[in-house]
Amino acid sequence: MELRQLRYFAAAVEEGTISAAARKLHLSQPPLSMQIRELEEELGTILFERGARQIVLTDSGRALYRYASEMLELERDAREDLKSFSQGRAGSVRVGLISTAESKELWDGIRKFRALCPRVQLLLYDAPTMELLEMIRLAKIELAFIRTPYPTHDFDTVQIRCDSFCAVGKADLLRGRGKIRLEELSASPLVTYRRRADMVRSAFAAKNLPINLIGIADDARTALQFAENGIGTALVPESAASFLGGMKIRRINADTLNTELSLIKRKDTLVSQAAKTLFQVFVDLKRREAGGQGKESGGGRT
């Protein structure tokens, strides 16, 4: 019993006559009649009585029609699902995400992707940048939102956001407006996270300033918790500062204290169509942003 035979049988039932079913299927009548007879012979039962005007289903025919309808509907669903998989509209994407990925640009891209692919499930893996790099090299994940610095030669990359570092906390020196200078922070108890500790030390050393670094955490959120509890001032990317409310935030006046949030995928590894779609969403958003900035700049020159 083949799906093709079931399709022919269902068409005959739904059209009421062999001749009408043949027209619907774009077949001549004799081959269609032969296929149904072969189906009856295989099943060892009569499926319908042939009348002068209309076929009449037997009990066996009615039972088979119920099964045939379910099987043909399942076939249609399977075809649609497989088409959706190939077009990136179904399935899942394995995505790595650092804890400081919070940003408007990130969520704008995710919302755009969800609108394009509402049936795709995002399988999210939270980890630091270096761990996500290893996971993507081992193909445990397909894409990753990470922060610079990282080796770029193995990856296709799209920049999501460039972040200045901020001083976050409850200290009185954060009450002021505008950017805060490193000189103002030098004597304060400071907390940052491990991947940025050397960069922070270097920024102070470049100005021959001492630094009172009382804590180095694995995660920027831990540094923010220290700040929230008044133990020190956290030095974190600006987008990470939004995790906790009720604290004072000032950008740091130091060109070297910045970081980029990026989306990456391996250049030499096949990824799912859904992963390609997600990556392309952020590429398109970045191009649109760059185009908008170009127009603004052009308008300013005229």
Image (spheres, rainbow, N blue to C red):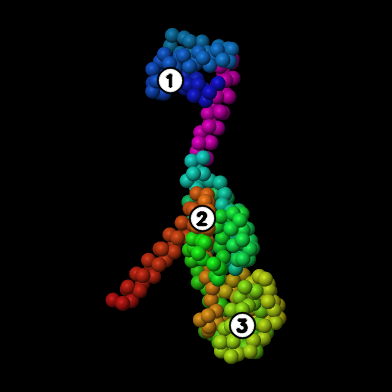
Give coordinates of residue 169: x percent, y percent: 64, 80
Q: Which residue is mark 3?
A: 201
Give coordinates of residue 192: x percent, y percent: 64, 77
Q: Earlier in the sequence, mark 3 or mark 1?
A: 1
Give coordinates of residue 115: x percent, y percent: 49, 52
Q: Earlier in the sequence, mark 3 or mark 2?
A: 3
Q: Which residue is mark 1?
A: 21
Where does the magenta region start and end? 57-81
Q: Which residue is mark 2?
A: 268
Specify the amino acid type for callout 3.
Answer: Arg
Q: Secondary structure at mark 3?
A: helix
- Residue at 59% x, 12% y: name it: 44
Specify the amino acid type for callout 1.
Answer: Ala
The residue closer to the viewer here, 109 or 158, is 158
Q: Is residue 98 above or below residue 112?
A: below
Q: CA distance from mark 2 to mark 1?
A: 51 Å
Q: Which mark is residue 65?
A: none
